[in-house]
Image (tube, rainbow, N blue to C red):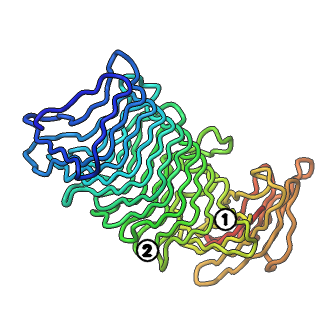
Amino acid sequence: MTAGILISDLRVRLYGVGRYATMITFNPSYDYQTLFRFDRGAAGVSWQCAIRDMALVSSEDTGLTKTAIELKDTSNMMVKDLIIGPWTGKGNSIGLLVRGREAGHINNLHIRADRPLVIDKNDQNPDNDIDHFNFSDLYLLVTQGVSQPCIFIADGLDLQHVTFGGFQAWVAGTFGLYWHDTTTTAVSFALSISNVRTEQLTGAGHYSIYIHRNALLDSLLIENMMADRFQNGFYFRRIQRVTLRHVTHGSDQHIGIKIEDPNPEQVVNDAQVIDGVEELVLDQVSIGSGEAPIVEMPTMVEKIGFNRLNSNSKVSDTAYYARIKPSAMGSHAMRFFGETKVWSHSGTLGNGEELNLPAANNFGRKVSMVWVAASGSNGSVTEGGQAMDAANSAVRLSGTTNFDVVNFDPINPIPVEVGKLAVFHDANTTVINKLGQPVDLVVFVTWT
């Protein structure tokens, strides 16, 4: 075939007799042609169409960009049991292009293309980009030498209840799933990704799953996944809840999870403004080894709305390991048990300076445990201790001579004494350095 076919009627079904038993070769004569386009245009939604049981091939790169199948403003669409590819042209030819709306059943596809799967906006009805789509049993392979992701989600797209399941093989290309959004204003909801293996990803600084949102994505579930260990694992920005369950990324050279915070100076406590990730749940996750960070996140916990980092396991004696590397601090190892949350900091604290802690009084938690250790130049000062911080007061449990705990009393204010390193309980709980010199400081906070 040298020209595409437009399907503009309702309930049209294109059935072959089997993959490669029915084979259609497409060699268009001009650019940007689509072999099969399901699109009713101004007439409305394309209802209950289907295409299945055939192979679509366009192996020659004649310098023309083409698309195998385009679904535009469809409902209850079925795409099943297809082989698409080789499908190449200008490094930009698309296997399957989805452009809205709802209830799509995409099953058992093998796509070898420059851009295997592209999910774009629905310009026919911008309020219904993609809703209740299920992609299952996909083998997505990027054309050799082409720098494109296996799955590309467009800027400005709103997504509701989209699942990737069955088996998912995302092979070659730059990213497994790539979604860089800078323009949305509405919240997207419920993206579920299961049973994925990414491999043979190319280039530098890429990720198996990269999601950068402008408006929030509420609820991202990734489970039973093996991420390509020769690339970074996961990148998240502006996602309200992220759960990784039974996920492996065994690399000692690449980042496991990176949480981006474009505004690290903004304190976020109300859960309405989230720059990074509000809640990250790691459940039976094996990510990173050696000195590679498992989670790389900016500055302090409360400044990125990162309220909980917990292992949500039903097995109480199961341990989880994480190496946290905030970009403004050093690297430090952590071990998580059950519902215990942890936060740590290492850095320099100048004389007279204070460090804000994510302790009980700051966040309305019932109780927190705080460990503090400080050392001056060449070990000239070594102080530290342990404190319990509750909603109304802090208590010194142990420590060196010049470690103190001070509770602010508005009637009879007691300042931190000169020569002391103190946990100071006020409207916020802080560590204050009054030791007379800058110190290297390590702080560890746990709570439930």
Residue under the point 71% across and 63% down: 341
Q: Determine the secondary structure under disc 1.
A: loop
* Residue 241 versus residue 101 in the image, above or below: below
Q: Which mark is residue 28?
A: none
Which quarter of the image is occupied by the N terminus?
top left
* Position of residue 86 measured from the top left corner of the image (x, y, whole percent): 19, 53
Q: Determine the secondary structure under disc 2.
A: loop
385 or 243, which is in the foreground?
Answer: 243
Q: Amino acid at mark 2?
A: Ser
Q: Which mark is residue 251?
A: 2
210 or 334, which is in the foreground?
Answer: 210
* Residue 440 versus residue 415 in the image, above or below: below
Q: Amino acid at mark 1?
A: Ser
| For residue 101, side relative to residue 385 (left or right) | left
Residue under the point 75% across and 52% down: 362
Residue under the point 59% across and 75% down: 333
Picture quadrant where residue 442 is located: bottom right
153 or 349, which is in the foreground?
Answer: 153
Q: Which mark is residue 311?
A: 1
Picture quadrant where residue 311 is located: bottom right
Viewer can see residue 91: no
Label 2: how many residues lie within 10 Å, few (<14), some (14-19) or many (20+)?
many
